[in-house]
């Protein structure tokens, strides 16, 4: 019988791994991909959808090509249990899938109680929109429907979280919409972090494009002591209560729940991995990918998850079919759009040490760059998007 690989989670990491294992083993490995949703909406470019630069359909991807062209057994179900001794995965639908190698790529879940007053039952009044799809549509509708002169508030997450520049790109896109539709509206960011990704670039951009609209309260002024009341639409910042019109709560994050159920998480709530192979430190027959991992210097991004997946796919094929595994190399770039044609980026390449995935060299956009360079950076991000989703979903 062919060796069996089961992949839990068909997002940036899991879809890439499924496609690479199936494609490169040319049918020698039986690949099953377990993913509950039939259309995966990328978080990447979901902020551009909020800003009106993309439509929703353009960030939605289905699994038809992975099944039809690559022969992957796509199962739309939730994995609810992993029996590591018996090497099986059980789904909510009651099916049991045996594996020789398991890949776990469930993304993130939220840390309960990290923003007092908020829990998942409040996500309709105060959306997180940190998993894309209906939540992103809801936040966009709330921003567009906000009363004239109203207040948009973001409760930003503590490190580590998916997409370090993501909250600040979102602020830029919300400001872009409000400048057109609701120019007297204000934006308030409450942030537990002292500093954030590409901060100088964002602050310069906000000053230039949205002067006077955006205020950020960092930890020195109570940004790390925030609670919310979704009923009254109030935000309490270190005892100071603000009434807000739209509130985007992005809670603290941990690995997707199934990683915890499978016993793959450590104290931090994320999964320790072997840097050279993406194998779990807890189980050599399991590889963990993407946001669920502790990936050293690599940020939690779709690009990173795709990069992890290619290393894991190569290792899995080598173990099961004897193909060659080359030394791991990882890379990432995070692009962000600040306003029309004003794109910025930060990126790096990485290599494994015994302890961690370590940065080798990197680059970042500079403040004061000319407009044509920023436009090129934005256009580069468009090319990246179409390339990477084809690399994931075929
Ligand atoms: P995901 O892509 O979240 O995939 C996990 C999948 O697992 C999901 O489809 C889920 O349904 C499934 N799943 C979970 N639990 C189970 C279970 N029990 N059984 C079966 N399936 C399960 N990254 C970039 O590279 N560039 C960007 O520009 C960028 N912008 C972003 C903007 C925003 C607003 C946000 C929120 C994120 C952004 N990211 C960006 C980050 C990127 O979306 C994530 O880092 C990436 O999706 C991580 O991939 P993953 O495979 O680990 O998780």
Image: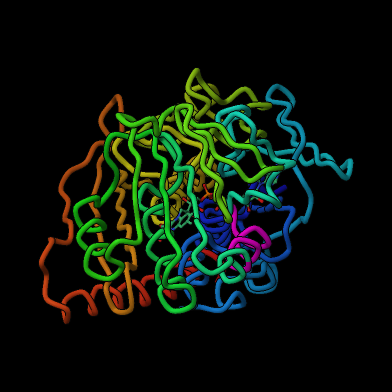
- Tell me if residue 74 comes above or below residue 7 in the rendering: below
The x, y position of residue 174, in whole percent, is 45, 65
**Identity of the residue furthest to the bottom in this view:** 372
Say whether residue 197 is visible: yes
Front residue of this view, candidates 125 and 6: 125
**Identity of the residue furthest to the right in this view:** 94
Q: Is residue 133 magenta?
A: yes
The x, y position of residue 252, in whole percent, is 51, 34
Q: In the image, what residue occupies the spot 68% across and 25% down? A: 84
Say whether residue 288 is visible: no
Q: Main secondary structure of the magenta part?
A: helix
- Tell me if residue 1 comes above or below residue 387 in the rendering: above
The part of the image, by quadrant, that contains residue 137 is: bottom right
The x, y position of residue 127, in whole percent, is 62, 51
Tell me which colouring the rendered structure shows: rainbow
Front residue of this view, candidates 349 and 100: 349
How many numbered callouts? 0
Q: Is residue 198 left or right of residue 238?
A: left
Q: In the image, what residue occupies the spot 77% across and 36% down? A: 80
Q: In the image, what residue occupies the spot 16% across and 55% down? A: 363
The part of the image, by quadrant, that contains residue 377 is: bottom left
The part of the image, by quadrant, that contains residue 306 is: bottom left
Q: From which residue to which does the magenta span run?
A: 131-141
Front residue of this view, candidates 43 and 287: 43
Q: Is residue 251 magenta?
A: no
Q: Is residue 158 left or right of residue 197?
A: right
Q: In the image, what residue occupies the spot 58% across and 66% down? A: 146
Quadrant in the picture for the C terminus: bottom right
């Amino acid at each position: 019988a062919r060796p069996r690989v089961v992949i839990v989670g068909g997002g940036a990491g899991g879809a890439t791994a499924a496609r690479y294992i199936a494609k490169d083993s040319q049918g020698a490995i039986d690949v099953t991909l377990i993913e509950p949703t039939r259309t995966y909406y990328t978080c990447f470019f979901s902020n551009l959808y909020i800003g009106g630069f993309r439509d929703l359909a353009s960030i939605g991807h289905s699994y038809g090509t992975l099944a039809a062209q690559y022969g992957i057994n796509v199962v739309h179900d939730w994995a609810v249990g992993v029996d590591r001794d018996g090497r099986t995965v059980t789904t909510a639908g009651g099916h049991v899938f045996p594996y020789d190698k398991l890949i776990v790529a469930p993304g993130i879940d939220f840390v309960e109680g990290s923003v007092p007053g908020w829990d998942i039952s409040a996500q309709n009044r105060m959306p997180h929109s940190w998993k894309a799809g209906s939540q992103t549509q809801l936040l966009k509708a709330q921003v567009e429907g906000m009363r004239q002169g109203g207040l948009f508030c973001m409760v930003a997450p503590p490190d580590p979280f998916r997409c370090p520049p993501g909250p600040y790109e979102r602020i830029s896109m919300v400001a872009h919409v409000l400048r057109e539709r609701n120019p007297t509206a204000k934006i308030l960011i409450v942030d537990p972090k002292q500093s954030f990704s590409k901060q100088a670039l964002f602050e310069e951009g906000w000053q230039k494009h949205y002067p006077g609209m955006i205020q950020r309260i960092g930890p020195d002024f109570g940004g790390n002591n925030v609670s919310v009341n979704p009923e009254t639409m109030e935000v309490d910042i270190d005892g100071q209560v603000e009434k807000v019109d739209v509130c985007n709560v992005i809670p603290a994050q941990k690995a997707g729940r199934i990683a915890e159920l499978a016993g793959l998480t450590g104290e931090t709530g994320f999964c320790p991995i072997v840097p050279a192979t993406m194998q779990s430190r807890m189980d050599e027959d399991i590889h963990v990918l993407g946001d669920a991992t502790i990936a050293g210097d690599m940020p939690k991004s779709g690009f990173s998850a795709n990069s992890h997946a290619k290393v894991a796919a190569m290792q899995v094929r080598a173990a099961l079919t004897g193909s060659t595994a080359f030394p791991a190399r990882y890379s990432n770039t995070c692009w962000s759009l600040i306003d029309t044609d004003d794109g910025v980026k930060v990126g790096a390449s990485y290599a494994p040490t015994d302890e961690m995935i370590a940065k080798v060299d990197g680059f970042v956009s500079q403040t004061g760059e000319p407009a044509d360079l920023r436009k090129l950076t934005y256009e580069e991000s468009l090319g990246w998007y179409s390339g990477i989703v084809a690399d994931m979903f075929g």
